[in-house]
Image: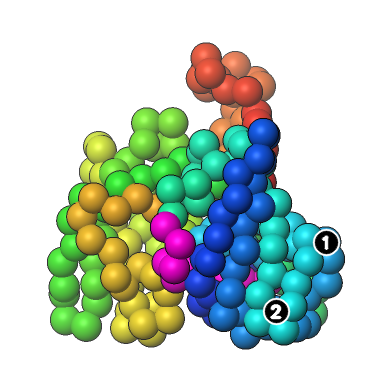
Amino acid sequence: MFTGLIEARGVLSALHPHDRSADVTLEDVPFAAALSRGDSVAVNGVCLTVLEHGDSSFTADVMAETLQRTTLGTLASGVAVNLERALQADARLGGHIVQGHVDAVAEVLSTSTVGEQLVLRLSLIPDVADLVVFKGSIAVDGVSLTVSARGDAWFEVSLIPQTQHDTDLGSLNPGDRVNIETDVLARHVQRLLQSQGVLRAPAHDTEEVVR
């Protein structure tokens, strides 16, 4: 479990594909020396498991499903990524509950500045449209944000200066793609309503876990 409060930024140095997976290596990671094999780290909002680590780097395994359904498989070597270690039980939940299980990939439609805030307008994927609500929580590339506006095919989030500086979101441009995770509580409510016949489940709903 994560909070969506980015702990640090690292650099994706290599991604080596295998038959059904890939190894990804992150460098310039401030907390790498404190990691252990099996630890969970969210990389741009995707929960990955540490295979090995050094003083400033770690390597994780990425399944084929994750490469297909998130942006990790398309990131170029040398790009900066958002990093967050799993939440400790005695820590404050400053953002919202984030699992690191990406629901969809959204495209940046436009960016605008309102005072010191940067407003991102993102495409609203039909598969998750019912789970994105005005003033609700959403994770964008692992960053806990509040939906500040919503239309039929888009939604907006507003970034304070600290978020612009401390995450990759401040450098996004129209056409860039980001990982989206909706609020887990909303997903459970939706599934409950579907099981009771109040809502119809999507025909393609396979309940696959992206990790």
For the rendered model, the colour scheme is rainbow
Which image quarter: residue 136? bottom left
Which image quarter: residue 32? bottom right
Q: Across the whole image, how many numbered discs are drawn on residues?
A: 2
Residue 102 in the image, given as x and y percentages of width and height: 55, 46
Depth check: 89 or 123 in front? 123
Depth check: 153 or 37 in front? 37
Question: How many C-alpha atoms fall within 10 Å of the one at disc 1: few (<14), some, or many (≥20)?
Answer: few
Residue 38 badge? 1
Residue 137 seen in this snapshot:
no
**Mark 1: amino acid:** Gly
**Element assignment for label 2:** helix
Q: Earlier in the sequence, mark 1 or mark 2?
A: 2
Q: Residue at x 43, y 81 (%)?
A: 166
Q: Residue at x 60, y 50 (%)?
A: 16
Residue 45 seen in this snapshot:
yes
Query: Is 68 included in the stretch rendered in magenta?
Result: no
**Element assignment for label 1:** loop
Query: Is 79 included in the stretch rendered in magenta?
Result: yes
Q: Residue at x 83, y 72 (%)?
A: 36
Q: Is residue 90 above or below residue 168?
A: below
Residue 189 in the image, given as x and y percentages of width and height: 60, 38
**Which residue is denoted by mark 2 in the rendering?**
32
Residue 113 in the image, given as x and y percentages of width and height: 16, 73
Question: How many C-alpha atoms fall within 10 Å of the one at disc 2: few (<14), some, or many (≥20)?
Answer: many
Which image quarter: residue 87? bottom right
**Mark 2: amino acid:** Ala
Give the residues drawn in magenta, as a range. 76-85
The chief SS type of the magenta part is strand
Q: CA distance from mark 1 to mark 2?
A: 13 Å
Residue 49 in the image, given as x and y percentages of width and height: 74, 57
